[in-house]
Image (cartoon, coloured by chain):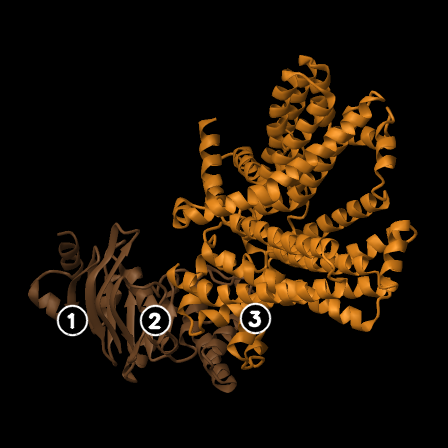
Chain colours: A orange, B brown
């Protein structure tokens, strides 16, 4: 047990920012934490809590009050499972610490158990906030006593275990049976693509339901809901926990613990049996290709072009970056088309299309604000910019010893983000405009708006990363996950964009200014913000790099 | 060609890594930089290449002050860092192309130099493969080629022999000699005293951020008669 705890503590230290990084900018961390807490976490928790409270209150009349929270927890478990797959492939098989752990006299299950725990702790913070919010909504909606609060705390801390154990077992089985495939990166990339296809599928299914709250309540008020029945078999800990809160009996909570313990035991048995054969030879994934021709193919380019190509190659070839930073951009157009197909016949879309065609000022403004908001959100979410310096990791010194000034290097890093995020967004905007039949000029204008929003979020991201980049990480996924800078950048970008969008809409609603004037103001505000973030990047970020 | 004057560097306001050190490396010289672990060798190398800023003092590379004219100073340097695990997702040829572009090496010149160096270090066949598939030694070799492909007048090499097979180490030593014969400067750190003994015109010995000795090995041996270089080094650094 002592060994296990020591290993977990050592592995967590490898993921979290080290003390030196924390001390370097204490005020920065405090300010950003406050913005993230009040800008993202608390509103999100409040939103979840209110929804579950409302659904539980509504379902109490039919005696099926647990169905709402159960469905929500199943959804969280499903997402945790889907995102966990990618994480555990990386943590179990591709992290840099494997080469140090394998030669130690440790049993496979000891390595896996400690890696699993460390990864679960660093991955589940947001999930725990959402779970506690949902359970709070459920307790308040169902008017439950103190005992339920106690169970909810246990549930919050232990609910992420089962879905992640499923991920762990699937990773080990896949790697065991694909151990003869020499290029392990391919396995990693395929699982990444699979993950996003599953997400697209879930989004499609949710979109198909039409977000009709009455339909949802009706479905959940059915005592024998078919989806819930299936989900209860897949994640049995969810109904056990909820029933335990509902009935206040000890039996359900004991079975809840029992299921988790059995799952953990099976997980460790699988690890003991198949982890080492799967992990062996991971380092020699690729063979040498003889190509005497490569030298003759060399050609001179400008330093910035070459630097840009290097950045793009690394993003596209590193599985963790490809799945987390690149792929998301090209799924947005798919989501746009899916959303259109699903809602084609609904009144909402018909009235929206009519609003755009007839030049309804409010509809046009909402469409524009939506484009700007999604552009900023996607650019912050894909973290190409906000991990631009972090991705250099241990070879950060390269930035400093090459004869290329920092401003040029940062601008190239920004260009990479603008190219990738901008391409995804422009395809999405064009797709949306074609589907809504908006006309050429309007489409060009929307593309410009999207590009400006992407540029603003990009330079903001680069600046945020320069303040305190996470340069010590074991594998590429760790550079992105557990990286507070990315989260803080997201918080700042979301809060700023929310202020701009809300401000624009309120101006439209409560002043005589027409939509054209508001859109001009929106454009000017975004240009101004882009200029400020660009200047921050060129002046402050270059200075920050110099002092690192 | 390398001049470091009164340089001081303190980490976290407590650890004094370098304490007012000064030395120079002239054209035509190979100077070895030796000292125990944690003595300040890598810090010195990083200050020379502009990776970290000194608290005080001046660094001149090929006539350019690294603080005032960093791009021109860096353009004159060929640097091998202490860790060759860099941009492993790139192919060897792509990495060399990046370096060639950054140092603005014309196409025909870079092809010729890359071909010659790759052949010398037995890396021609591997250039088309991603560096992640390379062994530690191969990665070190590609770093050596990258540092030399733009033919810089000043070589600053941090433990360049580590990981190299005997043939490649021999080739690198030959290259260092040829380079200095052309009037250029080589400054490298090493823990292998035999390498310093056979290769260097002069050595700089550092301990706890202080320069303990700066001169030729012959002079050092004359001052400490009948003692091996190993014993002299141990006596100096364990005082």
Q: Secondary structure at mark 3?
A: helix
Across and down, in percent, residue A453 comes to 65, 63
Q: Residues within 10 Å of mark 1 (few under 14, many from 20)?
A: some
Asked if badges 1 and 2 are on one and the same chain, I answer: yes
What is the distance, in whole Å, between disc 3 and disc 2 at their CAs?
A: 36 Å
Across and down, in percent, residue B107 comes to 52, 84
- The image quarter in which residue A361 lies: bottom right
Q: Which residue is mark 3?
A: A308
- In the depicted view, which residue is nearer to us: A187 or A440? A440
Which mark's residue is nearer the viewer, 3 or 2? 3
Vertical placement of residue A337 versus A214, above or below:
below
Q: Decide if residue B123 is in sight here.
A: no
Q: Which residue is mark 2?
A: B170
- The image quarter in which residue B80 lies: bottom left
Q: Residues within 10 Å of mark 2 (few under 14, many from 20)?
A: some
Q: Which residue is mark 1?
A: B216
What is the distance, in whole Å, between disc 1 and disc 3 at their CAs?
A: 46 Å
Asked if badges 1 and 3 are on one and the same chain, I answer: no
Judging from the image, mark 3 belongs to the subunit labelled A
Q: Secondary structure at mark 2?
A: helix
Q: Viewed as shown, does residue B89 lie left or right of B109?
A: right
Q: Quadrant of the N terminus of chain B?
A: bottom left
């Amino acid at each position: 047990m002592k060994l296990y705890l020591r290993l977990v503590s050592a592995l967590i230290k490898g993921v979290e920012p080290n003390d030196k990084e924390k001390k370097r900018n204490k005020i920065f961390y405090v300010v950003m934490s406050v913005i993230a807490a009040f800008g993202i976490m608390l509103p999100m928790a409040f939103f979840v809590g209110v929804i579950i409270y409302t659904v539980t209150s509504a379902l109490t009349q039919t005696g099926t009050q647990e169905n709402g929270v159960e469905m929500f927890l199943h959804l969280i478990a499903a997402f945790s499972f889907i995102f966990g797959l990618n994480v555990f492939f990386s943590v179990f098989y591709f992290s840099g610490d494997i080469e140090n752990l394998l030669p130690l006299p440790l049993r496979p299950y000891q390595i896996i158990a400690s890696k699993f725990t460390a990864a679960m702790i660093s991955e589940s913070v947001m999930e725990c906030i959402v779970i506690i919010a949902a359970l709070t909504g459920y307790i308040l909606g169902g008017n439950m006593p103190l005992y339920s609060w106690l169970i909810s705390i246990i549930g919050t801390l232990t609910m992420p275990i089962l879905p992640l154990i499923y991920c762990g077992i699937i990773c080990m089985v896949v790697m065991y049976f694909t151990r003869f495939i020499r290029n392990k990166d391919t396995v990693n990339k395929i699982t990444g693509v699979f993950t996003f296809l599953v997400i697209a599928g879930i989004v499609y299914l949710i979109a198909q339901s039409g977000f009709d709250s009455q339909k949802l309540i009706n479905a959940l008020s059915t005592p024998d809901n078919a989806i819930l029945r299936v989900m209860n078999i897949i994640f049995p800990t969810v109904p056990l926990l909820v029933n335990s809160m509902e009935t206040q009996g000890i039996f359900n909570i004991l079975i809840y613990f029992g299921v988790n313990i059995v799952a953990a035991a099976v997980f460790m048995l699988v690890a003991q049996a198949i982890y080492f054969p799967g992990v062996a030879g991971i380092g020699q994934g690729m063979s040498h290709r003889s190509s005497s021709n490569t030298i003759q193919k060399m050609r001179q380019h400008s330093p910035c072009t070459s630097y840009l190509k290097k950045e793009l190659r690394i993003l596209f070839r590193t599985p963790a970056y490809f799945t987390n930073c690149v792929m998301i951009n090209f799924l947005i157009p798919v989501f746009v088309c899916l959303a259109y197909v699903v809602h084609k016949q609904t009144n909402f879309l018909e009235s929206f299309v009519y609003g755009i065609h007839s030049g309804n000022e409010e509809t046009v403004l909402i469409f524009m604000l939506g484009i700007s908001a999604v552009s900023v959100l996607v650019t912050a979410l894909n973290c190409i910019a906000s991990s631009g310096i972090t991705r250099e990791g241990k070879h950060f010194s390269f930035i400093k010893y090459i004869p290329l000034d920092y401003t040029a290097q940062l601008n190239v890093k920004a260009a990479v983000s603008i190219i990738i995020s901008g391409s995804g967004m422009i395809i999405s905007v064009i797709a949306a405009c074609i589907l809504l039949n908006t006309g050429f000029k309007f489409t060009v204008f929307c593309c410009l708006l999207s590009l400006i929003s992407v540029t603003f979020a990009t330079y903001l991201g680069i600046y945020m990363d320069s303040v305190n980049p996470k340069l010590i990480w074991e594998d590429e996924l760790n550079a992105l996950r557990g990286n507070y800078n990315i989260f803080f950048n997201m918080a700042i970008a979301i809060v700023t964009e929310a202020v701009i969008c809300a401000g624009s809409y309120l101006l439209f609603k409560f002043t005589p200014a027409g939509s054209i004037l508001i859109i001009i103001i929106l454009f000017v505000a975004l240009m101004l913000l882009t200029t400020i973030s660009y200047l921050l990047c060129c002046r402050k970020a270059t200075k920050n790099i110099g002092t690192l | 060609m390398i001049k470091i004057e009164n340089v001081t560097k303190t980490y976290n306001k407590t650890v004094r890594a370098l304490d007012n050190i000064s030395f120079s490396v002239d054209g035509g010289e190979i100077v070895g930089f030796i000292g125990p672990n944690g003595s300040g060798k890598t810090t010195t190398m990083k200050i020379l290449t502009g990776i970290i800023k000194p608290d005080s003092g001046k660094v001149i590379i090929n006539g350019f002050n690294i603080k005032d004219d960093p791009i021109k100073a860096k353009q004159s340097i060929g640097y091998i860092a202490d860790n060759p695990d860099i941009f492993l997702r790139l192919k060897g040829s792509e990495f060399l192309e990046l370096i060639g572009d950054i140092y603005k090496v014309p196409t025909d010149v870079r092809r010729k130099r890359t071909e010659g160096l790759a052949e010398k270090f037995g890396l021609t066949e591997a250039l088309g493969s991603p560096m992640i598939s390379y062994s530690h030694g191969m990665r070190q070799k590609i770093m050596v080629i990258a540092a030399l492909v733009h033919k810089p007048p000043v070589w600053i090499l941090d433990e360049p022999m580590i990981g190299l097979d005997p043939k490649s180490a021999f080739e690198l030593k030959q290259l260092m000699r040829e380079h200095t014969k052309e009037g250029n400067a080589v400054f490298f750190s090493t823990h292998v005293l035999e390498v310093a003994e056979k290769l260097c015109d002069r050595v700089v010995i550092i301990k706890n951020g202080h320069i303990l000795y700066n001169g030729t090995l012959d002079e050092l041996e004359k001052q400490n008669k009948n003692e091996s270089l190993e014993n002299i080094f141990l006596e100096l650094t364990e005082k």
